[in-house]
Amino acid sequence: DVKVTQSSRYLVKRTGEKVFLECVQDMDHENMFWYRQDPGLGLRLIYFSYDVKMKEKGDIPEGYSVSREKKERFSLILESASTNQTSMYLCANAGTGDNEQFFGPGTRLTVL
Amino acid sequence: AQSVTQLDSQVPVFEEAPVELRCNYSSSVSVYLFWYVQYPNQGLQLLLKYLSGSTLVKGINGFEAEFNKSQTSFHLRKPSVHISDTAEYFCAVSEGWASGSRLTFGEGTQLTVNP
């Protein structure tokens, strides 16, 4: 059974804290993605990666950074969390040339 | 740039009734189209996808969608819904090989099936 796992289902942090969200996939896929999901706005792409140590900005990268040191792991970093980053964060992956994306269960982050 | 519009944010229906969830897209090139479903407190899972070929695509759980290039639409349909179909549905578009698997999602449609 293929899996995409995210480090936490629920997370509560304080304003100004550094936050790490981790995503691990066992599908040997090259492409990995981080989205945030907000009511009425759908999914918006934050960052994506085509390969180890490669990253590309998505539509809303401000306030976020990413790290991909290994093929199976893609981390999203909030350098200094703010209340407007309270959201559901979804990780996904896809194979090369295959536009179907496979999603993790999501992390619901609350910043107080 | 590509974009996706889901025309209804909420669709309430009664059990065993037919349903249509509407999706329109804009793109200057050929596209791939997807419908995903999200059950409460879960990630997204693929319902169906259109890559090429027949414009009528069948997916899981009895859903189907029709690609209409002239109307730039990809509406999702089911002839008879169940309570278990209550979920949020997302339409997504990709500009194929050139996009490197990148998807643009619509705003989502909450389908609520009532007894």
Image (cartoon, helix red, strand yellow):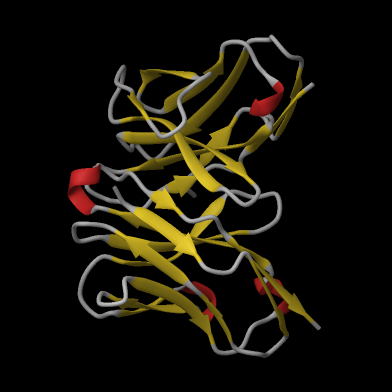
Is B81 rendered above or below residue A74?
A: below
Q: Is residue B101 left or right of residue A61?
A: left
Is A94 rendered above or below residue A62?
A: below
- Identified at 25% across, 53% down, the residue is B95
Depth check: give the residue in front, B12 or B7: B7
Q: Quadrant of residue B109?
A: bottom right
Residue B54 in picture, x, y percent from top left: 24, 80
- Identified at 56% across, 59% down, the residue is B108
Residue B86 in picture, x, y percent from top left: 69, 69
Residue A110 in picture, x, y percent from top left: 74, 28
Is A24 rendered above or below residue B23?
A: above
Count of labels shown?
A: 0
Depth check: give the residue in front, B59 or B21: B21
- Identified at 68% across, 81% down, the residue is B82
Depth check: give the residue in front, B34 or A86: A86
Q: Is residue B56 left or right of residue A9?
A: left
Residue B37 in picture, x, y percent from top left: 55, 61
Q: Quadrant of the C terminus of chain A?
A: top right
Q: Quadrant of residue A67?
A: top left
